[in-house]
Image (tube, helix red, strand yellow):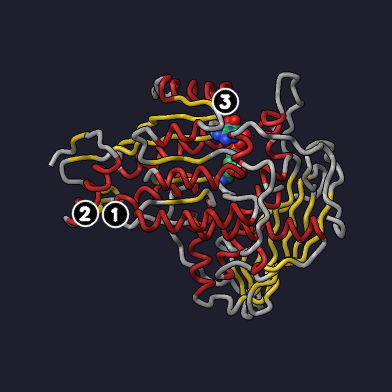
Amino acid sequence: MADRETDVSRRDFMKKTAGAVGAGLALVRNRPVYGQAKPIFKAALIGCGGRGGGAIRDSMAACKALGLESKIVALADVCQDRLDRTLAGLKKQGHDVPANRCFIGYDAYKKVMDTDANMVLLCTPPNFRPPHFAACVDAGKHVFFEKPVGIDPVGCRKIIQTGEAAKKKGLGVVAGTIWRHHGPYIGTQRAVAEGAIGKIVAGRIYYCTGKLWFKERKREWDDAEYMVRNWVSFCEMSGDHIVEQHVHTIDIANWFMGGPPVSAMAMGGRARRKTGDQFDFFSVDYEYPGGIHVQSMSRQINGCCRKGGQTFVGQKGETNGCGRAKDWEGKKIELPKVKTHKSPYVQEHIDLLDSIVKGQPLNEARQIAESSLTAVMGRISAYTGQLVKWDEMMKSDLALKPTPEDFETGKVKAPPDDVVPIPGKA
Ligand SMILES: NC(=O)c1ccc[n+]([C@@H]2O[C@H](COP(=O)([O-])OP(=O)(O)OC[C@H]3O[C@@H](n4cnc5c(N)ncnc54)[C@H](O)[C@@H]3O)[C@@H](O)[C@H]2O)c1
């Protein structure tokens, strides 16, 4: 039967794919075969920055790999120049988004909800993730969202709650924690869970790298725009770099350890930054259930040792978490080979789309919310100088200000540059 391109609404799309699955959808060379219609994934992007452009490309590549049609139906940002740049890039590749579907402003995400997009890619700075995710799920849209998904306990818990609502509605939710979608990691985690290195007794995780960008403030920028354009400098936007970057590795630790830690005892400080209010380095001792400790280091200072990745130490041997393991005699431990797309950025979209088509939507909301909150817990411990417990994070009413709502209502006051928490006093 020849495939016919059909432009379907989200509801029709869900019905059609569910019908196809019910009728015994066959997978031929990883390509779903549909009855008469080939569903179109209509994607909207919120946050037209570096990663947003990448997520569009990856989502389209995933559609191609699965034999699905894709279309970009709406764009949203708060900065006209960022949206224009993304649109120009799309046009070069032969895609257009009409002007009446390009939305600007802090409420632009709400306008996306009124479009026929059935998939939304959330790629703004992470402080906006909780309300944007909630709006998507309310509107019945599938979601790909970038990590991290929250910067404070209230926001992270809101993601868990919204994730549960997404489950009830049968919506797919996948996070940008790429390593969960990469063959060498998947094979190693599986083998470790089955005892390849024995019970894990310790771990080490690293995200020590150089500095990121900073944009000098322009006279015409208000506080909100200054913070948005320099979001990687403000804890209230990024969660600090332990949350924004190191969440990738913290997520791997939670994955291998089977869940989040029970507490964090951390230290950190600031040595080079002059702007914003973030630290330059963190060292955290995470304690997992059973008294197992994972030592974590993250840093953003040039000219220092750069080190990323992880090691998990078991009773029988150790592993780098992604394809290598050896026993205590130094003998290689064989790990299963899991084949995935060469780019985990594409694979995560393949997994999301394929799960939706099969009628068994993936839902990664809780795992990424917990990993974001694990990073937040490390940050709070370093800022305050106190031991912080997971139970406290699950109850804390800490919501950093300015909140996403403050941006929408125009009430943003940027925190002063170069004033940071002092452990023992904060
Ligand atoms: N998975 C990965 O490997 C990876 C890599 C890079 C970035 N990221 C994540 O992706 C996200 C975005 O990072 P980026 O590097 O693209 O940043 P960016 O600054 O390049 O892009 C962010 C965009 O969001 C827009 N924006 C800000 N607030 C908005 C709002 N309220 N509504 C709509 N648009 C808004 C900005 O104007 C900007 O265009 C972050 O969470 C980051 O941690 C993930």
Say which residue appears at 70% left-offset and 65% top-offset.
204
Which residue is nearer to you in this view: 177 or 270? 270
Q: How many marks?
A: 3
Question: Disc 3 on helix, strand or loop?
Answer: helix
Say which residue appears at 59% left-offset and 79% top-offset.
199
Q: Which residue type does callout 3 highlight? A: Arg
Q: On screen, 8 above or below 192?
A: above
Q: Which residue is mark 1?
A: 358
Q: Which residue type does callout 2 highlight? A: Leu
Q: Which residue type does callout 1 highlight? A: Lys
Q: Which residue is mark 3?
A: 82
Mark 1: is the Cβ under 8 angstroms from ligand 1? no
Query: Circles 2 and 1: CB distance less than 8 Å?
Result: yes
Give the distance between the C-alpha atoms of the residues marked 3 and 1, in whole angstroms: 35 Å
* Residue 133 visible somewhere in the drawing: yes
Instruction: Mark 3: give few (<14), some (14-19) or many (20+) Cα within 10 Å.
Output: some
